[in-house]
Image (cartoon, rainbow, N blue to C red):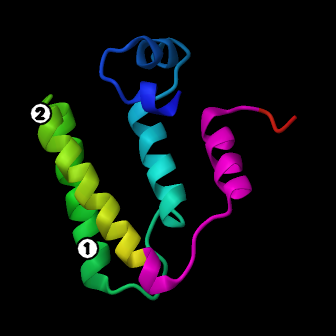
Amino acid sequence: MVLLASVPEGLVTNALAALGIDTERLARTLDEGRAGGPRPARHSTPEIRAEIEETRAEKDSAIEAREFERAANLRDHERRLTNKARDADGGRLQNGALLAKVRAHLGLDEH
């Protein structure tokens, strides 16, 4: 479903939007969760953190400009950078923690 939610103007994207869920924010939350948190951990270099933030801003601008191929390339670059930062910091959220973060983002109860 997450993959389908990334298809612009797709059925799942539109359904989530109708429920008031920001699919771009959802994608960022998932990327952050896979990378170990909303920002690279404290041991990664300031240069890597700055490049991640710059790439993220460029990606968001490309999405707003509907330059989806460019945005996808920037997303991939951002992932490589966050993985590099995570590897430098040596950590990753466990699947349960990632799921809890996504559920909280979507406003779902923890039944």
Q: Secondary structure at mark 1?
A: helix
Q: Residue at x 62, y 43 (%)?
A: 102
- Tell whether 44 sits left or right of 18: left
Q: Main secondary structure of the magenta part?
A: helix
Q: Is residue 103 magenta?
A: yes
Viewer-nearest of discs 2 and 1 = 2
Mark 2–mark 1 Cα distance, whole angstroms, equals 23 Å
Viewer-proximal residue among 84 and 54: 84
Q: Are marks 2 and 1 in contact (CB under 8 Å)?
A: no
Q: Position of residue 60 (x, y in %)?
A: 24, 43
Q: Taking 2 as reference, is 86 above or below it?
A: below
Residue 86 placement: quadrant: bottom left
Amino acid type, label 2: Glu
Residue 67 placement: quadrant: top left
Residue positioned most to the right: 111
Q: Position of residue 66 (x, y in %)?
A: 15, 28
Q: Position of residue 74 (x, y in %)?
A: 20, 52
Q: Residue at x 31, y 15 (%)?
A: 9
Q: Residue at x 47, y 16 (%)?
A: 12
Viewer-proximal residue among 34 and 42: 34
Mark 2, Cα crowd under 10 Å, few <14 / some 14-19 / many 20+, is few
Q: Taking 44 as reference, is 9 above or below it?
A: above
- Which residue position holds label 2? 67
Where are the magenta residues, as a range? 86-108
